[in-house]
Image (cartoon, helix red, strand yellow):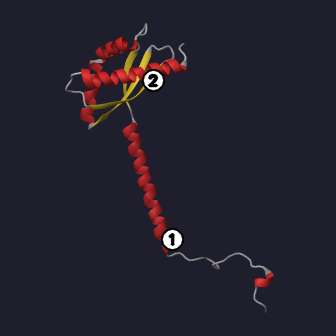
Amino acid sequence: MADPARARKIAERIKALVAEYLEFRLKDERLGFITVTDVRVTGDLQHASVFYTVFGDEASRADTEAALADNRGRIRSHVGKGLGIRLTPSLEFIPDAIPEGAANIEAALAAAKERDAELARNAGGAAYAGDADPYRKPAEDRPEE
């Protein structure tokens, strides 16, 4: 079992190597505008999960996923040459859910902003239920009878 610092360094190196290979060396017309967002390596350094996002519609995401599946061996070979460790980890490409999560957060923020605006509109014509100053005054400030 490798120490977590070494696994983290190897994960960062794998992220850089995969991104460099996808940008400069992989010539596949199905590959869309892809961003490698994260890499997680198991404790024994045998398996790496590569998280990615694709800018575009569902068709471009599906094409990019097919291109990554078809070129997984070439990418793993490039990673193995760049890492220089005894065993090259197997790669698994996982689409990241960052865009969907960001869309959910944006929708929740828009709904909260609308509720705040509605509360501000309702509070504009509001009046106090009792006196404007509900606190007791000291005896010397009270009017005499």
Residue 11, quarter of the rendered image: top left
Residue lying at 76% horizontally and 84% vertically, measured from the top left:
141
Q: Is residue 16 visible?
A: yes
The foreground one among 99 and 142 is 142
Classify 10 Å Cα crowding around label 1: few (below 14), some (14-19), many (20 and above): few
- The answer to whether one can see residue 66 in this image is no
User: Residue flagged by tag 2: what amino acid is it?
Assistant: Arg
For disc 1, the marked residue is 123
Q: Secondary structure at mark 2?
A: strand
Image location (x, y in percent) of residue 121: 46, 69
Picture coordinates of residue 38 (x, y %)? 41, 28
User: Which percent across, then down, holds residue 144?
Assistant: 78, 91
Q: Which residue is mark 2?
A: 40
Q: Residue at position x 43%, y 10% from top?
A: 85
Depth check, front residue: 76 or 21 = 21
Question: Percent x, y for residue 97?
Answer: 39, 35
Q: Residue at x 43, y 46 (%)?
A: 105
Q: Nearer the viewer, mark 1 or mark 2?
A: 2
* CB atoms of marks 1 and 2 within 8 Å: no
Q: CA distance from mark 1 to mark 2?
A: 50 Å
Outermost residue, top side: 86
Camera-side residue: 7 or 48?
7
Quadrant into which the N terminus falls: top right
The residue under label 1 is which amino acid type? Ala
Quarter of the image with the C terminus in it: bottom right
Of marks 1 and 2, which one's residue comes earlier in the chain? Answer: 2
Q: Residue furthest left?
A: 29
Residue 34 appears left or right of 83: left
Judged from the image, the secondary structure of the residue bearing numbered disc 1 is helix
Circle 2 Cα neighbour tier, 10 Å, few/some/many (<14 / 14–19 / ≥20) = some
User: Which quadrant would residue 103 be assigned to in this image?
Assistant: top left
Q: Is residue 53 above or below residue 9?
A: below
